[in-house]
Image (cartoon, rainbow, N blue to C red):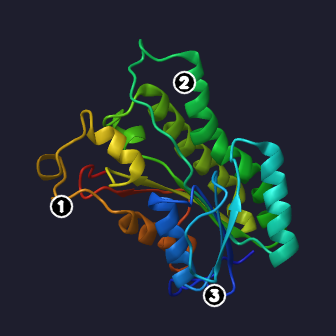
Amino acid sequence: MTIPISAPARLDGRVALVTGAAGGIGKATALALAEAGATVIATDLGDSADFEDAAIHYLRYDVTSATQTREVVAHVLDRHGQLDVLVLCAGTITHRSLTESTDDEWRAILDVNLMGVVNPIREIYPIMAENGGGKIVALGSIAAKIGGVASGPAYVAAKSAVHGLMKWVAKSGAAKGVYASVIAPGPVETPMWSTVTQRSAPSANGNVPLGRYGQPEDIAQAILFLCSPASNWITGTVLDVNGGMLMD
């Protein structure tokens, strides 16, 4: 197939599924995609979420469940007839060191941060490949590139695996029009990050050249870029959005 030339960052007529969308980066992303014209299915673990935009439809969805994944995808296709964009924001973090970490902790972190990416992609990738393509963006982390910021090794390992998985998807899907890339945020002020700031988080002034922590909107706009026609010659990339904390 012929890959289209890049165009403005609009998503009119596209249907997008966003995981981990009840708050933080996921919620900001759902709002940004809807503002750009997409119909958005926002998902998370809760029974409801505070979205007033008519273009955003909320579904309860546990990304660690392969059964729920199939049900959610079937629902989206039955209601909307297409699925063009997948954004994977669901995540959880741990702080324990390698020697303090437990088997249960490793399983929980890998289940959400890695299998919570694998399950939706495994279901949606072949659909996109058969229907002319689509764009997949996963949240990675600066932690995967520098060995951690204030998180534990389980989180670093899970996010490193996400980086590698998305490169595989990008290489496999390119000829089918399926794009796959990663956003690797630095420290962003979200509810999850607040658990880190109580420990050994970097100083915004001392460690981040741009002088502040990130906000969810900083990451959401970068995700929008990778989901939109503006990035039609970009795939398999890990885009650093970290205020200059890592200059790679």
Q: Is residue 88 above or below residue 106?
A: below
| Residue 161 quadrant | top right
Give the residue at the far left of this rendering: 206
Q: Earlier in the sequence, mark 2 or mark 3?
A: 3
- In the rendered image, which quarter contains the N terminus? bottom right
Q: Is residue 100 visible?
A: yes
Q: Residue at x 40, y 50 (%)?
A: 191
Residue 176 shown left or right of residue 200 in the figure: right
Give the residue at the far top of this rendering: 99
In the picture of the structure, the residue carrying the numbered disc 2 is 105
Query: Dot 1: what SS?
Result: loop
Residue 12 shown left or right of residue 29 in the figure: right
In the picture of the structure, the residue carrying the numbered disc 1 is 210
Query: Dot 3: what SS?
Result: loop
The alpha-carbon separation of the residues under discs 3 and 1 comes to 33 Å
Percent across and percent down for residue 201 are 25, 39
What is the number of the mark on residue 12? 3
The alpha-carbon separation of the residues under discs 2 and 3 comes to 41 Å
How many residues crowd mark 3 within 10 Å: few (<14), some (14–19), many (20+)?
Answer: some
- Find out whether the residues at labels 2 and 3 contact each other: C-beta distance under 8 Å: no
Q: Amino acid at mark 2?
A: Glu
Q: Earlier in the sequence, mark 1 or mark 2?
A: 2
Q: Residue at x 71, y 62 (%)?
A: 59
| Residue 48 quadrant | bottom right
The alpha-carbon separation of the residues under discs 1 and 2 comes to 34 Å
